[in-house]
Structures are given as structure tokens and as C-alpha cells.
Image (tube, rainbow, N blue to C red):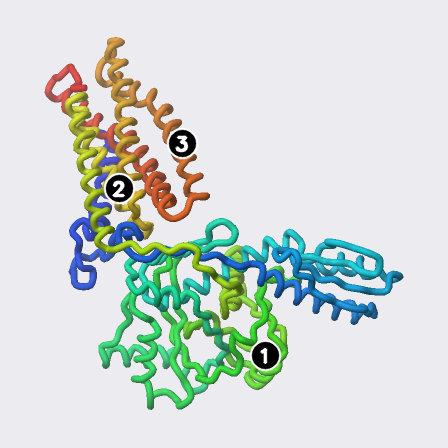
Amino acid sequence: MTRSWWGKLFLITFFTVLSVVYVYPTLANLNLATTKFPFKQKINLGLDLQGGLYMVLGVDFNKVFKETIDRQGSSLQSTLKDKGLQLNSVKTILVPADDPRVQVEFDPAKREQIYQLVKKQFWTLRLAGEKPGAMEFGLSHEFRTEIRDRTLNQSIEVIRNRIDEFGVSEPSIASQGTDRVVVELPGVKEVERAKDLIGRTARLEFKIVDDKAMNQDQVAELVSSLENTNNLSYKEGEKFSEYVRKLNELAKGKIPEGSELAFAREKNTAGQEIGRTPYLLFSKADVTGDDLQDANVNIDQENQRPNVSFSLNPRGAVQFEKLTGDNIGKRLAIVLDNIVHSAPVIQSRIGGNGQITLGQGDPDALMKEAKDLAIVLRAGALPAQLEFLEQRVVGPSLGQDSIKSGALAGIIGSIGVFLFVILYYRFSGVIAALSLLMNVLFVLAILVGLDATLTLPGIAGIALTVGIAVDSNVVIYERIREELALGKKPHGAIEAGFQKAFRTILDANVTNAAAAIVLLMYGTGPIKGFAVTLLIGIVTTLFTAVFVCRLAFDAYLRWMENRNVQTISI
């Protein structure tokens, strides 16, 4: 065997062993809390396999559009007044409900001045109607789209905060279309409590960080000491607020009166916690989310870096100006549901409008951070009324039945495929069967590695993967048979068979991948689960059918040469 062959064998062996390590906790149904097995992660089961609550919530945009047009009308009136253009009247027209307008009446002689000013400074408005001495302005189509996207994102952020507080592991919260939010809560049994929790408003607070009493390192040491001496720790799936409450009770007498411990939670792209930063905050919140009017991402014209601007109502502006003016040089923690999301240093007195700078770094990363922070700031309250349009409760016993039925169907189907290829292609069929087993193993391992959720349609995707994979083997083997029939020796027939079959296999899998990508982009829930497993299966099929099988045939040819066997078993 060549050095290249041994290198490929090592690579396949490495991937196989790694896949076994990833899949073993799931197949052996290990208790991750007590097992000594080094790898502690299982395949996440979807709602249809684990049981739980499925809800579809509708977002009422009419109220959002009305509130937005009211603010735009007030801003327009104020701007025109500053320019010396006095309006006779400003009123909101709510017909049609999904496209409210602001009607302004004015001196007809000033029509062109008013129109040009609105056109220049209010890209958010469009001229929707006009008559002598009056114009109607509605929200521009671009701004309406932005409002819809922003409202959906804010609603999802608020719901996610509520669900995290509820202690549900691996929830699925996503938008559906332009006006719906789909929520899947695996394992939830308290349906009414979950619904009440989702509809509740998130609490946003601005608090000063008490760095004078304890610096950041001292706070971290105190938290570590309290956890160790009291055997206190936070486990994923539990209520984080309950952990913080216990910690603050234990910290009484060790932190100044009127202060409290809070945390910033760092999470990866899969939503798993990867770290926590403790803060010592003053308990009193002089400004809350009730005073927040809006928050948006802007670009600093001087350094071209994103920042987050926010505006407060008149009451909040007065309180915020006093809070920031009295604490220049100190850190201001932005706390949402007792979780610190940011703690910037106060550079100057801030009134009704403020700005949060994000420092330096990768422009794309800074823009993402700015958008996330703006969403968090706006998530102090649900931006629109949510209506429960659909609700389904899946029992855990039904989920277990689905797992058993799906697994049984997959096993029976796989055994049938294995028997067929072995009986029809003899020893070459054994190679195909082993590659199919490795294919399924790789799919399951990748699901664990990506922290993806396995659903019942996902099991169907794995079964389909087996079918696609064996089809690739059939194409290769029939090509090899054709080459043998033309009189080629086994080595030449195998070489030509793999080369000529590769393009056909690639074309078929690219076509399947295109269909799966469409399902992934436009599908929801179980459909996405099917698309994910299908896409993973397409990648592993190309690897096993072409790479693994070819390596096995090279070893088979070597065995034939050593024993002077002239006929390949195919």
C-alpha cells in the first residue's frame, strides 16, 4: 500500500472514532449528569419526538403602524415649526387600518416649501394624498418593511428571554411569513403558564455598576467563593433567576447594602452558554424600559463605525440626564430580565437621546453586535399585541412512540437494503453495506456536532440518505460491471467505473441539495429538520460512496493480487 492510501485510512479511522464518541451518549442513552464518559452531549430531540408545546402567534401590525405614524406626525410638526412653517392642523387618519396617514393642513402658498422639506428630511414618509391646502403622508414602503422586520425580531427576542427564564432546553422560536411567530417548546407540560410567560412584558433597567465597592476581579472571587462554600451552581435548563436570587441571599453582609449581583451571559451561535461575567450593581433603577421610546443602529460619520442610538420619553429623559450627569466616568449597566447585556462607560451627561459606542473591531461583527444591542434595548416591552392563532400539545408518550416507530422503520429498511446489495453484488455489496453504516454514523455525529435538532421528518431524511447512498453505489458498481464486460482487468475496471460514475453521482446529489436548500430557506419547523438531515446526508454520501468505497476497493485489489485472484466479486 502507498503512503497516500495509509494517510486516507488514518483520516477515515479518525473520523469514524470521533463519530462514535459523538454518537455513543445518545445510542447508549447515558445520563449526562452522572456519566463519566468524557463527551457529554446528545442529539437534541424535536417537539414531535420529545413532546411539548407548539404555538403560532400572530403579530398585530396595525397598532404598530398607528403609533409610528403618530410619532412621525409629531416630529414633522416640530421640524416644520423650527423652520418657520406653521401648520394649521395635524391629525391622524386610521383608514385603512393597515396604512394610517397623518394629514397636515397649511397655507397653500407654502405647499412647495413643506413638500420639499418632507421629501428631504423624512424618507420614512410618502405622499399618499393631496388637496388644496392639505396633504396626507403615509409610511413609505421601505420603512413599513423595516418596521415589520424590526417588530418581528423584537418580538422574538422578548419571547426568547421569557422562554429562557421558563427553563426550557432547546426551544425553537422563529418567524413565519411576515406576521407570525412560531414557538416550539420541547418537554413543556404547563401549557397555560408557558402562554402567560410568553405574553408577559420583559423588564429593562438602567443601573450603575458599583466599581467603587468592589472591582471586577473581587466580584468574580466573591461569586466563586459563595458557590464553593455553599455547593451552589447553575445547571442548564434551570431558572437562572433562581440561581441569582440564591446567590444574592448568600451575599448579604458581603456586599454593600443597596447593591446586588447580576451577570452577563455569553452564548455561542447555538444559544449555549459559554461564560458568565458577574457585576455588582446598585439595586435602584432610576430609569426603566417604561421610559424607552426607541433604539436604532446608526453609522458614525467620522469613523464609519456602527453605534446604537436610543430615545427616551420626556419623563425618562429628565431622569436619565440626572442619572448620567451624576455618574460620569462610571459604568452604566443595561439590564434585561436581570441579565446584563452591556455596561458602557458614561462619557458625558445624556439627555433624551443617547448613543452607545461599540469600540473597534471587525466591521461586520460590530454591525451585528449593534443590531443585537438595539433589539435588546427595544425588547423592554412587546412591540405589538400577540394573538395565539394555533396551539398543539404533543404528549411525551406519543414522542416515544414516534422514536420507536421511526427507529424500527429505519432499521427494517436498512436491513432490507443491506441484504439486497450483499446478495446482488456479493463481496462488493459488503463494502457498500459498510459504507452505508458509516454514512448513517457520520450523519448522526454531525447532528450532534452542529447541535441540530432531530425531528421525525429528520429521521425520514436519514432513511432517504440511505437510499441516495445505495443508489450511488449501484451507479458505481454497474459502471464497473460494464467495464469488466468490455474485457478490462479488475484494476482498470474499478478505476474507470469510479471515474465515469462520479459525474453522474455529483449531478444527482447537487440536484437533491438544491431542493433541500429551498426547503431549508422557505420551510418551517419539521420541514427544516428534514432539509437539514438531507443536506448533511448528501455530503456524507459523497464522502462514503466515492472516498471510502474507493479506499476499500484498493485494499480489495491488493488482497486479490496477493492471492492471485483474477475475478472480482461483483
The residue lying at 69 percent from left, 57 percent from top is: 138
Q: Is residue 526 left or right of residue 419?
A: right
Amino acid type, callout 1: Gly
Q: Could you say where residue 171 lies in the image, as x and y percent from the top left? A: 35, 58
- The quadrant of the image that shows the C terminus is top left
Q: Could you say where residue 232 lies in the image, as x and y percent from the top left? A: 25, 76
Q: Which residue is mark 1?
A: 316
Q: Could you say where residue 366 lies in the image, as x and y percent from the top left? A: 52, 60
Q: Which quadrant of the figure has residue 490? A: top left
Q: Which quadrant of the figure has residue 411? A: top left
How far apart in space, not on screen, are marks 2 and 1 (Cα)?
A: 56 Å
Marks 3 & 1, CB-CB < 8 Å contact = no
Q: Could you say where residue 62 lies in the image, as x and y percent from the top left? A: 58, 59
Question: Which circle, 3 or 1, is nearer the viewer?
Answer: 1
First in sequence, mark 2 or 3: give its number: 2
Marks 2 & 3, CB-CB < 8 Å contact = no
Q: Is residue 116 left or right of residue 549?
A: right
Q: Which residue is mark 2?
A: 442
Q: Is residue 535 left or right of residue 175?
A: left
Q: Which residue is mark 3?
A: 510
